[in-house]
Amino acid sequence: MNLEMKNIIKTFGPVTALGDVGLNVGPGEIHGLLGENGAGKTTLMNVLAGTFPQDSGSVVINGITVSDITPKKAGELGIRFIHQELSLCNDLRVFQNMFLGAEYNKAGFVNKKDEIKRTQEVLDYMHSGINAETLVGDLETAKKQLVEIARALLFKSELIIMDEPTTAINSQEIASLFKIMNQLKNEGVSFIYISHKMPEVFEICGKYTVLRDGKFIQTGFIKDINEQQATELLIGKTFVSANLKENSPPPAGEPVLSVKGLCGRTFKDISLELHRGEVVAITGLQGSGTDELATAVFGASPVISGTIRTANGALDLRSINKVMKSGIGMIPRNRKERGILPHLSIRQNNSLAYFTTKHKQLLVSQKQEHERFLSNREKMDIKVSKDTDPITSLSGGNQQKVIVSKWLGIDADVYIMDNPTQGIDVGSKFSIYKLMNSMAKDGKAVLLFSTEFPEIQQVADRCIVMYMGAINAILDRNKISEVNIMAYSTGAQLEGVQ
């Protein structure tokens, strides 16, 4: 498919989301669409996918100007938009998801047999290893991504838009996804690839287009720029990727969290100490036990045995409220499902943790809520019009800043941060890195769960690497390297696993 988007303008009331933006994508091309949160990437793709119309400008496909695009028409044109939040129904089988809304009908009945057969043909063609009759809810996130791609191929899509497809999958699964994308590219399928992860963009994309503040900035071949230049194009200024921990002495504060012999469904015999003023990263591949460990320390996942103590004594893991009142806060992964209440305002979301642990009055003071938000907005550089607007009116990066800021209100001793920069832009990421560093200097302690090496290197004083549910290595600051982390997380080197 040859795609040309010319002079696209899209406004929402007084806000110009897209101002004279263009994008060209050729057949068999993987094109990186780059920009910070709020740059206009998703808006441009929603125009292309027919979610809403542009105010002016044109969309030209294979030399023909296409108007009045709807989602159905986009599908008929061979365009498929795979969103960051996957649109699959967990309670349906794979083949049912594939044909949802486009079922094979025969004499008024769904032809289940043909649907299963056709679905399996596409899945096998992709070497996905997925059975067409599997319940989607039983699939790992990476497999769900493949089902979305398979659905695009089932209906002969020629252009697939992928929005942050790797935020919830590990490095091995990313490699498998890229292999399939390259295979399809060689067969003429094009991709528009949206990601904030520069190493991935430079690995998979052949061309790029940068948007900033709703405007077209630059397009070209990936081979002609480097990651530093791309980052500077995104934020509009020279960006010095300073190492926040460089030359910092190791913290020597008192222990504020002590975990002894903790066992859960997916992890075993976890023992660690977290000291005041320290940032400790915990990492590992999918299936290593890190996901459940993060929630278990906060009392949100069951613990089979073991103990957790704070400076105030043993932690009662039966009540999250008591965990919070013991001086522990948690920034969860997956902001859409766990981090925000979408029907509440920005101000109300910002106050939720405070209400749980600190609020003693009978009534809520709107003035105090507003002042609390203003204080956090300054700390986190939250870009917002009015704090009474719905939380969903913010970009992903600013939503994440609100999620982080709401926990500042409880003044915890320990902050568990579970992939706190997932799916946000480089500027927002750096704001959160600086906050972590500032919190540590103020005597707080941070337990960071992350799968991104650049993030770990930026902020961690120590790094705990897990493998097969156990701690395999604890790396001091001077031993933290991508090679070491990968070796211990894959089991290439074994220290702590018995």
Image: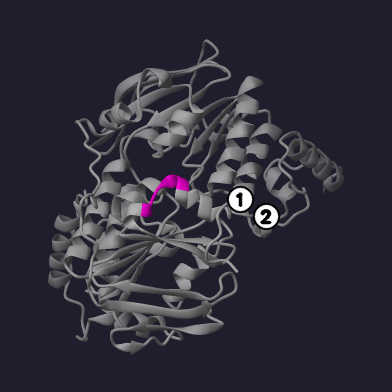
Instruction: Report the side of 53 relative to 133 (left or right).
Output: left
Mark 1 lies on residue: 88
x 77%, y 49%: residue: 131
Q: Quadrant of residue 286?
A: bottom right
Instruction: Report the side of 432 relative to 322 (left or right).
Output: left
Q: Amino acid at mark 1?
A: Leu
Frontmost residue, 44 versus 486? 486
Total labels: the figure holds: 2
Mark 2 lies on residue: 136
Residue 347 appears anywhere in the view: yes
Frontmost residue, 57 versus 127? 127
On whether residue 295 falls in the magenta region, the answer is: no
Q: Which of marks 2 and 1 precedes in the sequence?
A: 1
Alpha carbon distance from label 1 to label 2: 8 Å
Q: Amino acid at mark 2?
A: Val
Check contact, mark 1 vs mark 2: CB within 8 A. Answer: yes
Frontmost residue, 487 versus 399? 487
Give x and y (percent) for residue 101: 67, 44
